[in-house]
Image: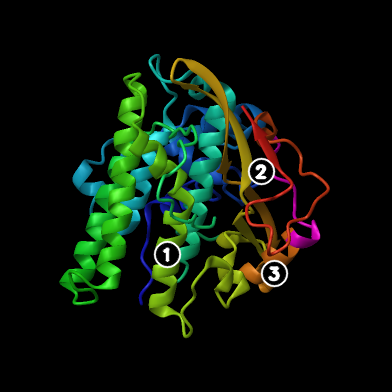
Amino acid sequence: MGQRFIPDSRMMQELVWDKVGTKENKRYFPLGLDVFAVLGNPRAAQLLDVVYKQPTYENYLSQRKMLTDEIVALSPADWQQNLYYGWMYCLLPLQTPRPEGYPAFMRGLAWQDKSLVTSLGSWTELRHDTLLYAKQSSVAECGGEFEEPPPPTPGYVEPEVEAYERLSWLLKLNKAGLLQRKLAMEGDELAMSFDEFIGLVDFLAAASRKELRNQPLSKDDLYALERYGGTLEWLMLAMNNLVAERPSDSWWDIESKTDRSMALVADVHTANAYALEEAVGNAAEIWVVVPFEGKLILTRGATFTYYEFKHPADDRLTDEAWQEKLKAGTTPPMPDWTRNFLLPPGPNVPSEEDGMSTGEESGC
């Protein structure tokens, strides 16, 4: 497959030497934050300008503005031209601060940083999944069934309606492409998995609309949230079993330990014999106070952890090596600004059987 130039690689290429900096002060490496500042995230821009002091590089701000102007000029049709652009399009709604009318927890700086880490983590996964496609810039378990189900546990959906709607569109585009190329047939396991995933995302959008209108979630909604982890596991297993030599009945039955972990790493830029690595770690627990039936309750979920660091280009990290670093506690630190919502890692190191436990907690 030939490599293609993709929008974020162009952003990075335009924000390093010899477009940015001087012979005496060259900007050799971009930052993941560059991508989201160009996409319009004011917090990413603030961190770059104030914390990382990137405007000290000549032409940095003018180049970034030029790229932002290009992004603003893109039409929905431009964003929907292929799956790569479509994935980036799904992340756009997360780049703007939430206005009045959204829950209080979503309007603080900590949540802005959490959403920025979510964007960086998702983008890292996109780059990881398209390493051969992209032209690099250079210089839970399912629960049992009950005849009489107990009352549902209180639950809450992060109300990002536009992001869910765009993800639903992206899934439909993906399914249509597979059907068109005869790689799937209506009614087969692959097509049905897409239908299930689309239904799940549409449910998240519908629940979010209720929350933003201060309408209570129905009992069926709450039961669906209780089953959410099991539904995700079923979807992942269905996709895995389509390509695995040995089908798996549960997540921990997947033969590859590497595939069982969400942790991954991708190099996105090379300069001076070093590669810029973007990495996702284990999930962190996140604790959020949310409105529920006229009260405020404490809820627990999961969120991304994100790493960015340089590594010798002649020894590019594999997912296996990165996961070993996580297990051994020898990873570089996460960006300093993530401390705004992430507590430092605790002493416990997750084993392969620990599921979501990471030794990190997030409080907003």
From the viewer's side, name the closer residue of 299 and 6.
Answer: 299
Say which amino acid is labelled 3: Ala
Judge depth for marks 3 and 1 and give the one in front: 3
User: Which numbered circle lies on residue 25?
Assistant: 2
**x, y (%) of residue 199?**
28, 50
Tell me if residue 21 comes above or below residue 267 in the rendering.
above
Residue plotted at (62% across, 72% down): 257
**Quick check: can you spot residue 309?**
yes
Say which amino acid is labelled 2: Asn
Residue plotted at (39% across, 69% down): 238
Tell me if residue 96 comes above or below residue 286 in the rendering.
above
Residues under labels 3 and 2: Cα distance? Answer: 33 Å
Q: Quadrant of the C terminus?
A: top right
Of pointers 3 and 2, the one earlier in the residue sequence: 2
Relative horizontal placement of residue 213, taking residue 338 as reference (left or right): left
Q: Main secondary structure of the magenta part?
A: loop
Say which amino acid is labelled 1: Ala
Residues under labels 3 and 1: Cα distance? Answer: 22 Å
Q: Secondary structure at mark 3?
A: helix
Of pointers 3 and 1, the one earlier in the residue sequence: 1
User: Which numbered circle lies on residue 134?
Assistant: 1
**x, y (%) of residue 219?**
36, 34
User: Which numbered circle lies on residue 321?
Assistant: 3
